[in-house]
Structures are given as C-alpha cells and as structure tokens.
Image: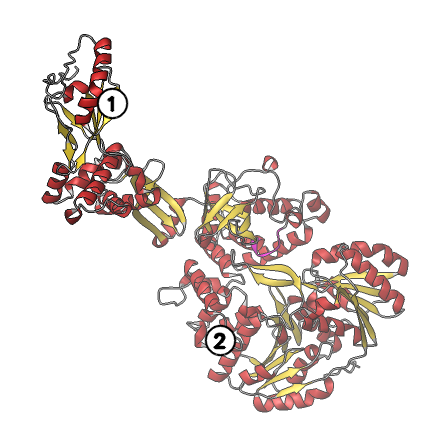
C-alpha cells in the first residue's frame, strides 16, 4: 500500500476542476507529493481523455527519479505505463501513458508535432524556478490551447511562487493549494562569517547535527559536484567514526548512484546535494539540513552564447525551501553557513531566466513554431527587447534566418539538433563539409564541461608559454585529448594519470554517441588529415562568426574582437602564432576602463579569406584619409574590415584634394598653428601692422591677432598635404598678398621693408617687438645726410645703428643732426687712428658718401 501524502486529499478536486476548465494552477510545497501523485491521478480520472500525460521537469535528474519512483509505487516496470525521456536517454515505449520529460524535450516534441497529437494533458512542474524553457512552454502551450487544442489540459504546479499572476495569465483559471505537512524546524545562522574552506565548515556542521539529533538523515546543500567531492573526502573520518553513509547527489551521476542517494538506507545517511534537492526530488528521512547558501546558477555568456554555471548566493525563497526539507517527517534542524544579516540582505526570489539569459535558442524555437517575432505572442514576463534583438542578430549571423526572417534550410536542420544554435550550426556545417562525426564530437566537447583536470584550477590564467604546445586550435586539442581517452578505453585511473577528468570524459562520450546518431546515414568519413582539419576550423567559424578576433601585436596575447571588445588570450592556449582567430570560450573579467574584458580560454585560428568566402556580405571596404603624426602628412588608408577587425589595409601619401586639405587643417589645429607662425619676417610684419594702426588710426590695416593668423595658416592648407609644405610657405608674403591694393600701398610707403641712403645703398628696416624700427649701416653711408630717414610720413624717425668698418656700432641714435654736431668730432679722431685708410671728413653732414660696395662673390 502506498504511503499517504499531503497532496492526496486534494486530488479529486483537482481532477474535477481540470476536467471542467482544462487549465489550472496548483500550489503545493516540496514534499507534498505533487510530482509523483498528480500525473497518475489525471490519467486515471480521465482528465487526459485517453491521451498521454506529459510532465515537464526542469532537470534530467528530476524527470528520471520521478518516473522511477512512480513506477515503483505502482509496482510497475519503468518504461511501461510510466516512463521518462531526457536528452540522450529514454525509458518509454508505445504503452507509456505518463511520460516525464525535461522541458527541452517537450519543446522539441512541440516543434516536431505542433498539435501534440496523442497528448491529453501537460503538467508544468516546479514552475517557480522560472527557467527560460519554462516560460517558453507556458507561452507556446497557452497559444496552442487557444488556437487548435482547446481540449488539451494544462496544469501548472509551483512550490513557492505566488500563483496569482500565472492564473491571471491563463485567463483567470482555477487555483488550488495544498498546505502539505510540516513539522517544526529550528534554524541556526552563523554568529559571524566563517573563512574556513567550505568542506571544513560542512564537517563541523554535520558533526553538530549528529550530536544534537541521534536519528534522521542529513542533507547538505552545496553549489556543485566539485564542492561535493571535496566535502565527501573531508567527511570520511567522521563517516567511519559514526558509521555513516555519505552519498553525493547531482545531475551528472549515473542513475543507480542518484537512486542510492534518494532511497532509504540501513545506515544513517549524509546526502551531499546540489540544488536539485530543493524542490524537484524528495529525500525521505531527512531531519537535518546544512545550507551553504550557494548554488550554481545557469547563465549564458554574452561572449559565447553557450550556457555556463556561476556560483552565487541563493535567494531567501530558496533558503526557505532548503530549510523545509528538514521538517517533512519529523521536527528538524537547519544550520545555515552564513549570518542572519546575510540572509536578510538577499533577494526575495530569483529573477526569471527569461530576463537575463541568451534568447537565441528560444527564438529559434519560436521561428520553428511559425512565430515570426517574440512580441507577437503573450508572455508571463516579456523578454527584454535588447536581448531579443541580440538573439535575432546571432541567428542571422548563423544563417538560420532568411531576409524575411523565416527559417532557412540551415535553420530547420539546426532545430533538429538538441544543441545551442551555435553548436547546432557547427554540426550542420560539419555535415556539409564531410566531417560530421568530428563536428558532433566538437559539439559534445563544447557543450559539456572541459574534460581536462587542469581546467578545474586554471581559471583562465594558463600555464607559462614554455611548456605549452603550439597548434591551430584549442578545440582540436580537446579532440585529441578525447581520442586519447578513447584509446585508454575510458578507464578512470588511466584517464586521471593523463590529466583527464573521468566523469567529464564520460559525459562527452555519451553526448558524442547520441549526436552521431543524428547524422544522416552515409559512407564512413575519410581518415583525419590536413584537409579535414581545415574543414573543422572552417566549421568552427560558422558557429562563432561573431567572435572573430585579431592580435594587436604578432604573437601577443591582447586581441580585438569584431564586436569592438578587447580580450586577452590565455597563456595556456596553443594558438600562439596565428594573427586571426576565434574567441570561442571566454572567462569574463571586471570591466574597469583600460582593462581587458575577458580571458580567452579556447581559441581557434582562421584565415581572412574564409571570411570573404563565407561572410562576404559582412566584410566592408573603406577608403579614408588619415593623419600620420610621425610622418607629418595626410595619408590615404584603404581597409577591409570584418566588424572592428581589420583584415587588410594599405596606406600611402594622399593626393592633394579638398578632403586632404581638411585633414591637414585639423592636424594644424591639434598640433598648434603657432608652429607655422615663427620667424623674423612674420614678427616684423606683425610690428608693421601695429605701427600702422598707431599712426594711421583712420585707415589702419586689419589686426594680425592670433585668430587672424591661425585662420590664414588654415587657409594655406589648401592644396597641401604635409607640414613640410606649410613650413616652406612664405606666410608673411601670403598675408600681404591678401591685402587690398590700398592697404598694400600704405604698408609699403609708410612702413617699408627697406630704405635707400644718399649713396645709393639699400638697407633693411628692422621691426622688432618692444623696440622702435631701426636700420644699420656704415657711418660713411650716412655722409651727406642732415637728418636720418623717417617712416609714416615723417612722424616716426628710424633709429640708426652707425657702424665702424669692422661692422660694430660706434653710435646708436635717432638724432643724426645732433650726432654730427656733438659726437662725430670725437668719434672721427678715434676712427682716423684705427682706420687711417678710410676717408673721415670733418663735416660729415655735407660730405660725399662712398659708393655702395659691390656684393661679395
């Protein structure tokens, strides 16, 4: 006789409501029996109308163990009336009436048979977990009922989530609740954080529970299989001391070991479990719970789009569920390995995965169901538009969608494969290139955990380059590692001695076998050679075409991706020489400014010509003018780019053009126009303009201020392409040429560059800042002059530098008449003594100046 469970009294009312309305929501806490009792009750009450009852579970373990338990309760063979179907595994047949499936398998059944022929009822179990597939199934099944299957019964079952929004989404359907059965549970928190390794904290907590309660089993919640293995090893001394059976429970275990953790044991049992024991699986006899407060949370990397697991704190709702496991059969006790303040600071519920996950697989499913866009159907929680757009873009890159956003032949084939769209695309391309079996192995390797033991401790940092092999692809290195495992007959001890993790190798082997069965039947593939290696590298490109990257420097670790992001190649990567590559698996890092966004753990080489062949429409060509600061010239740059990755470029000196002049002018602004406004001639011109403004205020020349000079330099950029050309230009002459004829005449007459002395000698007028204009020449050149030359119509006397025959000034004056009268007699006597060969007349004012000296040869 079956044990009575809390859900049993509610079953008649549930069946009656569901038979009448065909849709309902059931709230029942973990341990109430909803997973095992409700589906058979629906079948036996005729709610399914003679059709099959499908029960969708969020995990493979839950589907397998629930089917096993139900078959056992009814003393039936598993795979008969009660069965299950999960990824790559099935125990079912034609007579199966209650079929436990994973949510992903139910989605695939919907795509293969949109009307769910032969199915009378669908149960969505553990809806409160809100996986992406859970929300997608609710949307598709609700749509199916309204369009073509109003007779299909739909039951949504939840443990802790408020069912009101779900009932409202399902047109205000009936809600039923089972209170379950709960004994008092005492909860203890840490007084302060414990910094010891988690496994040591677990040993202390388990010992304390055993001391406080002599009966009952202990359930320990840990994040993942690695923590479970370490805790199991740490508990060995305590287990021997107290005669305990310490058993693991997680999804990667063989079914027999999972059953051992769940079924009763003659020894007192300590079950080390992941969060699968929170709600999906009930373990009888547990009175003590140790809660680490941590779980592996599924997420999709924005780098790869592949699912990954991160360790994170659980929500308060999950903590409450874990605690409830201690009070199912008797009063219990919970030891939380975190403080009460930590508990209170956590989020109430985990957000739906639909709001934070990669949506490519979900959108591919929608397209497969004939739904063109995500906003054309109703959602319990609408997906973020930005994530929808990103997923659509990825599907376009993968070639799954045509221009009208319908499925291509590639997209339809991808839908047939139980893989993320990236890996499905790799398999499809592998089939096309004749390397389908190897592509299936690659998909299995990338879809499962890394099979190398070193990956458990590497964390993307990698080993030193000296002991790292060199090759074209880290993925092909994984292929070689798996082939080594195959040659070792998958023997665990031999695998470990070669650095391979046996369970991961087993998972890859299982996935490879199942994926290979999905390949079209054809002749055996040729032996692996260079051609097939290249085909595999090209195959990888089709799955990760948005992850194209290029090294910043030859053999350097820093890379730039097509998206514009930067990353750093792990030193452990074998892809050490290739310039172009794919960033296939990336460990994300903090995003501070100037720091790389991630470490690429798996890379694979590509060639630019492959991008031209496969993605020519995504390769852009451009010609642009750029400034080469080192050469100080405008250059013509021709580029061929794939996103932000430059595939090829060439550059050379730019030809003169309006565009080139604009680039040169911009460089002048950045460099500083003053660089081209240096020299005595320009300084003199600025002084001449200033003197004109002072002496001719009514008709002054335009001011030569900084902005005017800068504007003139920029104007001189026309027709030029280099700084050298600008430096060679006569800027003062250009400024004067820009004046009107009247302005030029004023400048030349009132403030000339040169003046002529009576003897015919022409001398330059010096205009310097802070000094009056001056000229310099031999004293004899001024013979015959009563007064010195003047500028500005006689208003501005020139300062005269009177030079001896040796070129040194003997007098500086602006009063030549006074010089002849007061200073010349004394200077004459000295000059006659020093330069007797020269003529020094007594009256210089009326003397004849010597003729100009001929220019030196």
Question: In the displayed structure, would residue 42 be above or below residue 376?
Answer: below
Q: Position of residue 121 (x, y in %)?
A: 59, 81
The answer to whether any part of residue 233 appears in the image is yes
Q: How far apart in space, not on screen, are marks 2 and 1 (Cα)?
A: 112 Å
350 relative to 521 in the view: left or right: right
Question: In the displayed structure, would residue 395 be above or below residue 44?
Answer: above
Q: Position of residue 460 (x, y in %)?
A: 60, 48
Quadrant location of the N terminus? bottom right
Which residues, given as a range, are shown in magenta? 446-450
User: Magenta span has 349?
Assistant: no
Question: In the displayed structure, would residue 331 be above or below residue 460?
Answer: below
Looking at the rendered image, the disc whose residue lies closer to the viewer, 2 or 1, is 1
Residue placed under numbered mark 1 in the picture: 811
196 relative to 670 in the view: left or right: right
Q: How many marks?
A: 2
Quadrant location of the C terminus? top left
Residue placed under numbered mark 2 in the picture: 114
Quadrant of residue 446 in the image? Answer: bottom right
Upstream in sequence: badge 2 or badge 1: 2
Closer to the camera in the image, 436 or 466: 466
Residue at position x 75%, y 65% in the image: 339
Check whether the beta carbons of the residues at disc 2 and disc 1 lie within 8 A of each other: no
């Amino acid at each position: 006789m079956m044990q009575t469970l809390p859900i049993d009294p509610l079953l008649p009312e549930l069946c009656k409501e569901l038979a009448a309305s065909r849709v309902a929501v059931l709230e029942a806490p973990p341990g109430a029996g909803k997973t095992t009792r409700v589906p058979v009750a629906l079948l036996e009450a005729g709610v399914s109308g003679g059709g099959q009852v499908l029960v969708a579970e969020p995990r493979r373990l839950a589907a397998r163990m629930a089917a096993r338990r139900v078959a056992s309760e009814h003393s039936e063979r598993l795979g008969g009336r009660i069965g299950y179907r999960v990824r790559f595994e099935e125990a079912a047949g034609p007579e199966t009436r209650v079929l436990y499936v994973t949510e992903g398998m139910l989605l695939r059944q919907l795509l293969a048979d949109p009307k769910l022929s032969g199915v009378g009822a669908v149960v969505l179990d553990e809806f409160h977990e809100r996986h992406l597939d859970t929300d997608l199934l609710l949307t598709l099944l609700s749509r199916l009922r309204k369009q073509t299957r109003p007779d299909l019964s739909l039951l949504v079952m939840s443990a802790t989530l408020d069912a009101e929004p779900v009932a409202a989404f399902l047109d205000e359907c009936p809600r039923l609740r089972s209170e379950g059965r709960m004994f008092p549970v005492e909860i203890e928190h840490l007084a302060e954080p414990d910094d010891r390794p988690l496994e040591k904290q677990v040993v202390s907590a388990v010992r304390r529970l055993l001391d406080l309660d002599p009966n009952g089993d202990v359930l320990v919640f840990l994040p993942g299989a690695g923590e479970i293995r370490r805790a199991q090893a740490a508990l060995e001394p305590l287990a021997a001391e107290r005669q305990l059976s310490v058993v693991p429970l997680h999804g990667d275990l063989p079914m027999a070991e999972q059953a051992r953790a769940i079924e009763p044991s003659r020894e007192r049992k300590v079950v080390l479990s992941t969060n699968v024991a929170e709600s999906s699986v009930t373990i009888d006899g547990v009175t003590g719970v140790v809660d680490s407060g941590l779980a592996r949370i599924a997420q999709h990397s924005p780098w790869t789009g592949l699912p990954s697991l991160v360790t994170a704190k659980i929500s308060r709702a999950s903590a409450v569920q874990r605690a409830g496991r201690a009070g199912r059969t008797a009063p219990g006790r919970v030891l939380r390995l975190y403080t009460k303040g930590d508990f209170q600071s956590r989020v109430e519920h985990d957000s739906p995965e639909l709001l934070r996950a990669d949506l490519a697989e979900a959108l591919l499913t929608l397209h497969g169901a004939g739904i063109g866009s995500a906003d054309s159907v109703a959602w319990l929680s609408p997906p973020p538009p930005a994530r929808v757009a990103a997923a659509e873009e990825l599907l376009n890159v993968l070639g799954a969608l045509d221009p009208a956003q319908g499925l291509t032949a590639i997209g339809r084939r991808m839908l047939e494969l139980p893989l993320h769209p990236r890996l499905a695309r790799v398999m499809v391309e592998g089939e096309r290139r004749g390397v389908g079996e190897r592509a299936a192995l690659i998909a299995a390797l990338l879809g499962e955990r890394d099979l190398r033991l070193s990956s458990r401790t590497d964390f993307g940092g990698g080993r030193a380059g000296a002991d790292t092999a060199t090759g074209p692809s880290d993925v092909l290195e994984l292929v070689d590692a798996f082939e080594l495992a195959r040659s070792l007959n998958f023997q665990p001890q031999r695998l470990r001695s070669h650095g391979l993790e046996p369970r991961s190798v087993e998972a890859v082997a299982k996935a490879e076998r199942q994926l290979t069965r999905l390949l079209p039947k054809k002749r055996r593939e040729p032996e692996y050679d260079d051609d097939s290696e290249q085909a595999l590298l090209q195959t990888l490109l089709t799955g990760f075409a948005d992850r194209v990257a290029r090294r910043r420097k030859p053999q350097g670790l820093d890379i730039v991706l097509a998206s514009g992001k930067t990353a750093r190649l792990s030193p452990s990567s074998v892809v050490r020489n290739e310039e172009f590559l794919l960033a296939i698996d990336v460990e994300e890092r903090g995003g501070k400014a100037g720091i790389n966004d991630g470490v690429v753990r798996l890379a694979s080489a590509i060639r630019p010509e492959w991008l031209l062949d496969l993605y020519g429409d995504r390769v852009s060509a451009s010609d642009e003018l750029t400034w080469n600061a080192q050469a100080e010239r405008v250059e013509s740059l021709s580029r061929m780019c794939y996103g932000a990755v430059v595939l090829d470029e060439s550059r050379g000196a730019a030809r003169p053009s309006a565009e080139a002049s604009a680039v040169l002018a911009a460089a002048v602004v950045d460099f500083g126009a003053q660089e081209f406004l240096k020299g005595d001639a320009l300084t003199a011109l600025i002084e001449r303009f200033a003197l004109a403004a002072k002496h001719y205020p009514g008709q002054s020349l335009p001011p030569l201020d900084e902005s005017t000079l800068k504007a003139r330099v920029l104007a001189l950029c026309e027709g030029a392409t280099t700084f050298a050309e600008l430096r060679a230009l006569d800027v003062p002459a250009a400024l004067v040429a820009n004046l009107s004829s009247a302005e030029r005449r004023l400048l030349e007459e009132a403030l000339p560059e040169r003046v002529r002395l009576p003897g015919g000698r022409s001398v330059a007028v010096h205009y310097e800042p802070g000094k009056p204009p001056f000229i310099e020449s031999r004293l004899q050149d001024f013979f015959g002059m009563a007064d010195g030359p003047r500028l500005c119509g006689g208003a501005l006397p020139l300062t005269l530098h009177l030079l001896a025959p040796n070129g040194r000034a003997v007098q500086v004056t602006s009063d030549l008449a006074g010089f002849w009268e007061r200073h010349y007699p004394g200077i004459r006597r000295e000059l006659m003594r020093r330069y007797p060969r020269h003529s020094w007349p007594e009256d210089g004012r009326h003397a004849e100046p010597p003729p100009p000296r001929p220019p030196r040869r």
